Image (cartoon, rainbow, N blue to C red):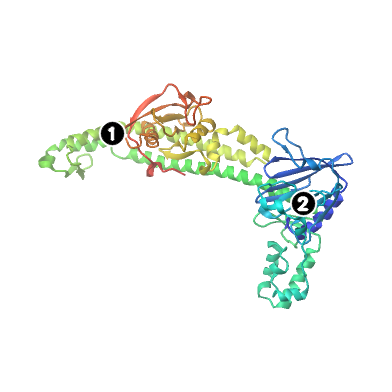
């Protein structure tokens, strides 16, 4: 109700007492859609702060405001040195105004997403300056049209069949909810009139409460669970500004940051559990070389072109079914199994190393979550974000990142979305130890394998990332493509070069078939 006439009719007189006779020192903006007006009286500064960025439209009248040394713009130059004559409210309208001794009028139109501040010259009906110029209809807004008169008689109430929104359109959601809770929609006309008069009596009692209703809101109704109550409308407005905007935004940003790390921790724990289970299965399972031994001892069973036979596994004493591919010889299948068995230990070692890296990452994420939970203010949050820039990709919404995100065998792979995005990824997200890949000598996406916390890179991950680099390039339709790779610290952007163009040193080349996303490497976005 802080933008509601029923509150503004109390706020405007309080502002008149506080600001009448004050001289305007400056008007400026240092963040989008926020206007600051500095006034002075008796050598004391009394700022007016209007935050008009939808949907967060709030007013504040702080004791002081520190203007930033940079990135602020002066506005409403014509008001400088002018003196506030009075502050008033428009009848039954979500707007109030300051009149100046020069005859100028500054109107605060608080129409939700269409809120604005308008400056009118002496005796002019339409504004000469707007704070939010994008609201084009305000350029022709006659301030006199904001003054409304409502017939609040019983006869008019009956004529409207007790329709609350038509009888008193200034009510707002909280008062309408109060009526609904008392059975207003189904009540007889006389009972509706009684409820309406009771509500108006309450609204005429200047007591202001801050309540938690889908965010912090201001209410003029009795609130048993109020966060705070005030008799001073300026104090209520200032506290609402702090709780809903300052603290509200801090809580939202902090919770968003926490969720990002908690999601990453959940994924990391899941990977550790799944990989640990896979490791145990591999250790417990028989090596592929045993089946190869069985095949080689029974080559005679594959005579006459048989592709499927049942053999006695002399290691276990059970029957085992062996299938050959068309035109495949049993000797080649055995050779493949011997090779796979030889690589088994390499696979086990790599899984162990990756699990160890993920356990270290889990500890690091838990520590960061604890640090964030201890942060109590915007300054601490900004300091944390500044000192943890390497986590920018974790804490930002995936849809807003300049790259697609893939996961493969516990490694994160990034693929740039466009030439400009390639530059942004290189400039703002990549760590010097990451591995950078690109299809050789053709246009394509930059691909990055994140190496943070990883001790070694398996060939399977390198080849998978290279396959993505080839797929997202002009080599997409080739059967085999050359892809270069090097550490990110050997990739640099040359000033003035075209988007996506870089200088690369110490690169190596791998030949891979172009392979796009699949179930094992499905993109998050």
Instruction: Give the tally of numbered discs.
Output: 2
Nearest the viewer among 201 and 253 is 201
Q: Is residue 218 left or right of residue 448?
A: right
Nearest the viewer among 371 and 159 is 159
> x and y percent of residue 46 in the render?
82, 43
Asked if residue 318 can be seen in this view, the reply is no
> x and y percent of residue 491 in the render?
47, 25
| Residue 445, above or below 188 | above
| Residue 298, above or below 155 | above
> x and y percent of residue 316 in the render?
23, 42
Single out the mark in the foreground, 1 or 2.
2
Q: Is disc 2 surrounded by few (<14), some (14 to 19) or many (20+) residues within 10 Å?
A: many
Nearest the viewer among 307 and 158 is 158
Q: Quadrant of residue 279?
A: top left
Secondary element at tag 2 = strand
Nearest the viewer among 273 and 315 is 273
Q: Is residue 482 left or right of residue 392?
A: left
The disc label shown at residue 107, or none: 2
Question: On the image, numbered disc 1 is attached to which residue?
Answer: 341
> x and y percent of residue 335 in the render?
22, 33
Q: Quadrant of residue 344?
A: top left
Dot placed on the residue nearer the N-terminal end, 1 or 2: 2
């Amino acid at each position: 109700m802080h933008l509601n006439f029923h509150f503004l009719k109390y706020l405007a007189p309080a502002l008149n007492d506080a600001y009448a006779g004050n001289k305007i020192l400056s008007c400026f903006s240092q963040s989008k859609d926020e206007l600051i007006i500095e006034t002075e009286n008796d050598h004391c500064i009394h700022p007016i702060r209007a935050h008009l960025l939808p949907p967060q439209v709030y007013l504040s009248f702080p004791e002081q405001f520190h203007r930033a040394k940079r990135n602020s713009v002066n506005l409403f130059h014509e008001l400088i040195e002018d003196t506030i004559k009075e502050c008033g409210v428009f009848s039954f309208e979500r707007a109030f105004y300051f009149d100046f001794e020069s005859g100028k009028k500054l109107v605060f139109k608080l129409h939700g997403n269409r809120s604005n501040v308008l400056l009118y010259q002496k005796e002019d009906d339409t504004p000469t300056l707007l704070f939010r110029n994008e609201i084009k209809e305000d350029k022709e807004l006659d301030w006199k049209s904001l003054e409304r008169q409502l017939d609040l008689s019983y006869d008019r109430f009956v004529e409207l069949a007790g329709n609350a929104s038509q009888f008193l359109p200034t009510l707002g959601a909280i008062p309408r909810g109060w009526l609904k809770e008392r059975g207003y929609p189904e009540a007889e006309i006389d009972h509706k009139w009684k409820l309406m008069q009771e509500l108006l009596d309450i609204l005429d009692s200047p007591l202001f409460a801050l309540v938690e209703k889908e965010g912090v809101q201001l209410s003029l109704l009795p609130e048993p669970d109020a966060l705070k109550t005030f008799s001073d409308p300026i104090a209520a407005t200032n506290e609402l500004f702090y709780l809903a905007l300052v603290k509200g935004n801090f809580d939202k940003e902090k919770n968003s940051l926490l969720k990002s790390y908690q999601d990453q921790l959940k994924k990391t724990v899941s990977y550790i559990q799944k990989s640990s289970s896979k490791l145990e299965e591999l250790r417990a399972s028989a090596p592929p070389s045993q089946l190869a031994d069985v095949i080689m001892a029974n080559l005679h069973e594959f005579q006459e072109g048989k592709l499927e036979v049942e053999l006695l596994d002399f290691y276990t004493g059970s029957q085992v079914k062996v299938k050959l591919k068309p035109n495949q010889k049993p000797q080649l299948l055995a050779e493949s199994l011997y090779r796979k068995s030889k690589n088994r230990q390499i696979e086990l070692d790599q899984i162990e190393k990756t699990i160890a890296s993920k356990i270290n990452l889990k500890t690091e994420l838990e520590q960061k979550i604890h640090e964030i939970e201890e942060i109590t203010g915007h300054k601490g949050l900004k300091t944390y974000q500044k000192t943890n820039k390497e986590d920018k990709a974790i804490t930002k919404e995936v849809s807003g990142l300049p790259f697609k995100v893939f996961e493969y065998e516990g490694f994160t792979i990034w693929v740039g979305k466009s030439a400009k995005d390639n530059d942004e990824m290189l400039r703002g997200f990549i760590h010097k130890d990451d591995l950078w890949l690109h299809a050789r000598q053709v246009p394509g996406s930059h691909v990055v394998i994140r190496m943070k916390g990883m001790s070694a890179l398996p060939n399977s991950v390198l080849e998978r990332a290279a396959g993505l680099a080839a797929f997202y390039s002009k080599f997409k339709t080739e059967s085999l493509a050359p892809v270069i790779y090097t550490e990110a610290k050997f990739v640099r952007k040359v000033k003035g070069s075209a988007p996506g163009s870089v200088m690369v040193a110490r690169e190596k080349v791998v030949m891979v078939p172009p392979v796009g996303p699949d179930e094992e490497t499905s993109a998050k976005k």
